[in-house]
Image (cartoon, helix red, strand yellow):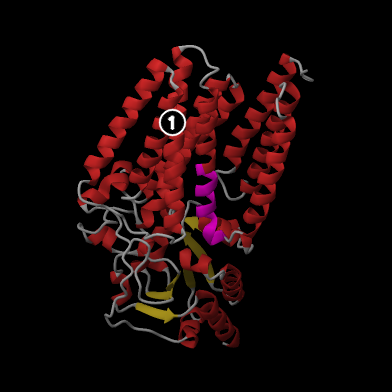
C-alpha cells in the first residue's frame, strides 16, 4: 500500500527536479561546485525515498540488499580514487547508468502497451548498450589497460556502418514484433557498436567522448522514464542529456575541432595519435636553483598547470610556491586551459583543493593577453595546451585548437618528467625555443627543490 498520495508524490518529484536543476547551475563554477553537488545528492535522496514510499514494490528485501551491496562497493572506491583517475570513474559510473537503463527497458518490454512505448524500449536498449560498452573502452584507454592511441583496422568504417544498419534493423524488428529475442539481438549489436564507436578515438579526444556518452546515458534514462511512466526520470535524463551535449560541444570547441572530426578523424588520419616516442633533439635544461633565480627576480609569473601536476600530486607544493613568490612582491596568476587535464575543470578543482584563491585562476581568454608582459611562464605538466603546432602546423592533429600563448612570455620554464610527448602524441616545438628552459623530474620533487631555493634567496 502506498504511503504517499499522488499529489504528495508529484510535489516531492518536483522538489527533486528543482534540486537537479540547481545542482547543474552550481556545478557550472568551481566556487559553487561543492554546494551544487550536495544539492544534487539531496535531490537524488528525495527521489529515492519518494519511490519507496509511493510504490508497491515487489522483492523489497532483494532491492534493499542490492542497494547495500552496491553502496558497499562504490563508496570506498569513490573515496580512494585519485583526482588523476576521476575521468575513469566518471566513465564507469556513466556506463553503468546506460547499461542499467537498457536492462530495465528489456524487463519492461512485456508490460508496455502501444507502439510509442515499444519505440522507447528499443531506443533505450540500443543507446544504453552503446553507452555501456563505449564507456568501458574509454575507461580502459584512460587507465592504459589498452593503447590510448586510435585503434583502426582495414574496412573499419564499413564494419561500423554495417553494425549500425543491423542495429536499426533489429530495433525495427523489436518495434514491429515486440519479440523479447529481438531485444537481446539489439542489446548485443549495441554493445558491439559502442566498442567500434570508441576504438578510433585516441589521445586527448577520449575525455570528450566520455562527455558524449554521458549525454547518451541521459537520453536513455529519459526514454526509460517514458517506458516506466516516471516523470522524474524523464526530467533528470533530459537534463543530463542536454548538459552532456552542451559540454561535449564546448570541449570540442576548446580544441578547435568538430565532434564528427573527433569521432571519425582517425579514419582520415586526423585524430590525436597518442605516440609515446621521446624526442632526442637537444634542449636547454637547468637546475632548480637556476629556475628559482628566474622566478625570484621576476615581477609577473604565470603558472600553467596540466595533467603532470595532478599525477605528481604537486598542487599543494605549487600553491606554497605561489604564496612564497607573492610574499616577495611578485604577481602570480594561473592560466587555465578549458581542456587541461583529463576533463573540464580538472585544474580548477585540483588547485581549489590546495586553497589557491579563485581570483588568481584565470581562463584562457582572460590570461592570454597577459603573457606578453609576463617575465616567466611556468608550465607544470602541461604540453598540448601550449603547443604552437596548434597555430603553425596545418598537418598537426591539434591544428586549430586554441592554446595558451606561453610562447609570448619573456622566459618559459617547463617542468617535465621526460621528453615524451603529451597526450596528443605530438612533439612540442616550444621546448626547443631559445627562451625555454626545462627542469626534468617529478613535478612535486622539482617544485619542492625550487621552493626551497626561492626561500633561500
| Closest to the observer, 380 or 290 | 380
x and y percentages locating residue 210 in the rendered image: 44, 46
Identify the residue at the far top of this view. 114
User: Residue 262 magenta-drawn?
Assistant: no
x and y percentages locating residue 198 in the rendered image: 36, 47
Query: Vertical placement of 456 versus 17: above or below?
Result: below
Q: Is residue 149 visible?
A: yes
User: Residue 85 magenta-drawn?
Assistant: yes
By secondary structure, the bulk of the magenta-drawn segment is best described as helix
Identified at 42% across, 50% down, the residue is 137
Does dot 1 land on a helix, a strand or a loop? helix
Q: Would residue 317 be found to the left or right of residue 109 on screen?
A: right
Q: Would residue 307 be found to the left or right of residue 318 on screen?
A: left
Residue 189 found in image quarter: top left
x and y percentages locating residue 368 in the rendered image: 40, 59
Query: Vertical placement of 300 versus 218: above or below?
Result: below
Q: Kindly identify which residue carries mark 1.
A: 184
Q: How crowded is mark 1: few (under 14 residues within 10 Å), some or many (20 or more)?
A: some
Region rendered in magenta: 83-95
x and y percentages locating residue 222 in the rendered image: 52, 27
The quarter of the picture where the C terminus appears is bottom right
Amino acid at each position: 500500500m502506498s504511503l504517499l498520495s499522488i499529489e504528495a508524490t508529484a510535489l516531492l518529484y518536483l522538489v527533486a527536479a528543482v534540486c537537479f536543476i540547481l545542482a547543474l547551475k552550481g556545478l557550472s563554477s568551481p566556487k559553487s561546485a561543492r554546494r551544487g553537488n550536495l544539492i544534487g545528492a539531496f535531490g537524488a535522496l528525495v527521489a529515492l525515498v519518494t519511490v519507496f514510499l509511493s510504490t508497491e514494490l515487489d522483492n523489497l528485501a532483494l532491492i534493499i540488499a542490492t542497494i547495500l551491496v552496491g553502496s558497499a562497493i562504490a563508496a570506498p572506491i569513490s573515496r580512494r580514487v585519485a583526482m588523476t583517475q576521476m575521468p575513469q570513474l566518471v566513465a564507469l559510473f556513466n556506463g553503468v547508468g546506460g547499461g542499467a537503463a537498457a536492462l530495465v527497458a528489456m524487463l519492461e518490454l512485456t508490460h508496455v502497451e502501444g507502439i510509442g512505448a515499444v519505440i522507447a524500449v528499443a531506443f533505450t536498449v540500443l543507446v544504453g548498450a552503446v553507452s555501456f560498452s563505449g564507456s568501458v573502452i574509454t575507461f580502459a584507454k584512460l587507465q592504459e589497460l589498452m593503447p590510448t592511441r586510435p585503434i583502426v583496422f582495414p574496412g573499419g568504417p564499413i564494419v561500423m556502418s554495417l553494425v549500425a544498419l543491423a542495429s536499426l534493423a533489429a530495433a525495427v524488428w523489436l518495434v514491429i514484433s515486440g519479440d523479447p529475442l529481438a531485444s537481446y539481438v539489439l542489446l548485443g549489436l549495441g554493445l558491439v557498436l559502442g566498442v567500434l564507436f570508441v576504438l578510433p578515438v585516441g589521445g586527448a579526444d577520449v575525455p570528450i567522448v566520455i562527455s558524449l556518452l554521458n549525454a547518451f546515458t541521459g537520453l536513455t534514462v529519459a526514454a526509460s522514464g517514458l517506458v516506466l511512466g516516471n516523470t522524474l526520470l524523464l526530467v533528470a535524463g533530459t537534463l543530463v542529456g542536454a548538459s552532456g551535449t552542451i559540454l561535449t560541444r564546448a570541449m570540442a570547441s576548446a580544441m578547435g575541432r568538430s565532434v564528427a572530426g573527433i569521432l571519425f578523424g582517425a579514419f582520415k588520419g586526423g585524430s590525436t595519435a597518442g605516440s609515446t616516442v621521446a624526442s632526442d633533439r637537444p634542449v636547454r635544461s637547468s637546475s632548480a636553483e637556476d629556475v628559482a633565480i628566474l622566478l625570484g627576480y621576476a615581477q609577473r609569473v604565470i603558472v600553467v598547470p596540466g595533467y603532470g601536476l595532478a599525477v605528481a600530486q604537486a598542487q599543494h607544493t605549487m600553491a606554497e610556491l605561489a604564496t612564497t613568490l607573492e610574499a616577495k612582491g611578485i604577481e602570480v596568476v594561473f592560466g587555465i586551459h578549458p581542456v587541461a587535464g583529463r576533463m573540464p575543470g580538472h585544474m580548477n578543482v585540483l588547485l581549489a583543493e590546495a586553497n589557491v584563491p579563485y581570483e588568481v585562476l584565470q581562463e584562457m581568454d582572460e590570461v592570454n593577453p597577459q603573457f606578453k608582459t609576463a617575465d616567466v611562464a611556468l608550465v607544470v605538466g602541461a604540453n598540448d595546451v601550449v603547443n604552437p603546432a596548434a597555430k603553425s602546423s596545418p598537418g598537426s592533429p591539434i591544428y586549430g585548437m586554441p592554446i595558451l600563448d606561453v610562447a609570448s612570455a619573456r622566459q618559459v620554464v617547463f617542468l617535465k618528467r621526460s621528453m615524451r610527448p603529451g597526450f596528443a602524441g605530438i612533439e612540442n616545438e616550444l621546448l626547443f625555443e631559445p627562451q625555454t628552459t626545462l627542469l626534468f623530474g617529478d613535478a612535486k620533487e622539482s617544485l619542492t627543490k625550487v621552493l626551497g631555493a626561492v626561500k633561500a634567496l
